[in-house]
Amino acid sequence: MKRITIIGNTGSGKSTFAMKIKEITGLPVYHIDKILWKKNWERTPEDEFTSKHGSILEKTSWILDGVGYHSTWEERFSAADTIIFLDMSLETCKRQALKRMEEDKIRPNPYVPEGCPYPIELKDKQMELITKNHIELQSMIIEMIGKFKDEKEICEFINEDQVNNFLLDLELSASYTYNTINDP
């Protein structure tokens, strides 16, 4: 696992999960939202995004979390050795997004560009977007993953327990590898 992509709905925990994998593996993390958005949630033009996205994919190792432009999914999935789909429930995504909006009042989200606040006044719009994405993105992601099921490691997690078990297994695997290498 040297090139990991994590995809899922808003509030599914992609960035948090990516950072936890980084803690265990030391792989660099790139957040799609940091190249998709500019200050005040101005969307990066697709050609500029695609260029920045492609530069990341050329690196030898990475964790890339987020959705971004659908036109880049196939290239990203093809470059990855591991595809992780956080297929969390609609309720989980909404709860996590609301929590993030509340936390943003105290500490801006470090996984988006500076100047991109989550105003609580837009809560209803955010909840509508999450619902729409849950319906539309899920089937698109599953279809895209299907193209790579025979050549990539695919992980689909539907709850926090599965995520935590994966992280525990990864930590045990990393510990075993480290100890084996360093055994006299």
Image (cartoon, rainbow, N blue to C red):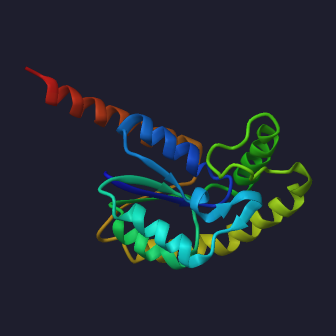
Give 70 or 8, whichever is nearer the viewer: 70
Count of numbered labels shown in the rendering: 0
Give 31 or 142, whichever is nearer the viewer: 31
Give 165 or 126, whichever is nearer the viewer: 126
In the rendered structure, the answer to whether residue 42 lies left or right of residue 36 reads right
Q: Residue at x 30, y 71 (%)?
A: 150
Instruction: Residue 10 in the image: state x and y as whole percent.
Output: 68, 58
Location of the C terminus (image quadrant): top left
Instruction: Residue 92 in the image: state x and y as whole percent.
Output: 70, 50
Q: Residue at x 50, y 46 (%)?
A: 18
Q: Residue furthest top?
A: 184
In the rendered structure, the answer to whether residue 110 lies left or right of residue 129 reads left
Can you say whether 36 is above or below 28 in the image?
below
Q: Quarter-wise, where is residue 178 in the image? A: top left
In the rendered structure, the answer to whether residue 48 lies left or right of residue 110 reads left
The answer to whether residue 139 is visible is yes
Instruction: Residue 15 in the image: state x and y as whole percent.
Output: 57, 48
Q: Quarter-wise, where is residue 80 in the image? A: bottom left
Q: Residue at x 72, y 46 (%)?
A: 96
Q: Residue furthest right?
A: 121
Can you say whether 162 is above or below 128 in the image?
above
Q: Residue at x 82, y 40 (%)?
A: 102
The answer to whether residue 87 is visible is no
Q: Quarter-wise, where is residue 146 in the image? A: bottom left
In the rendered structure, the answer to whether residue 44 lies left or right of residue 72 reads right
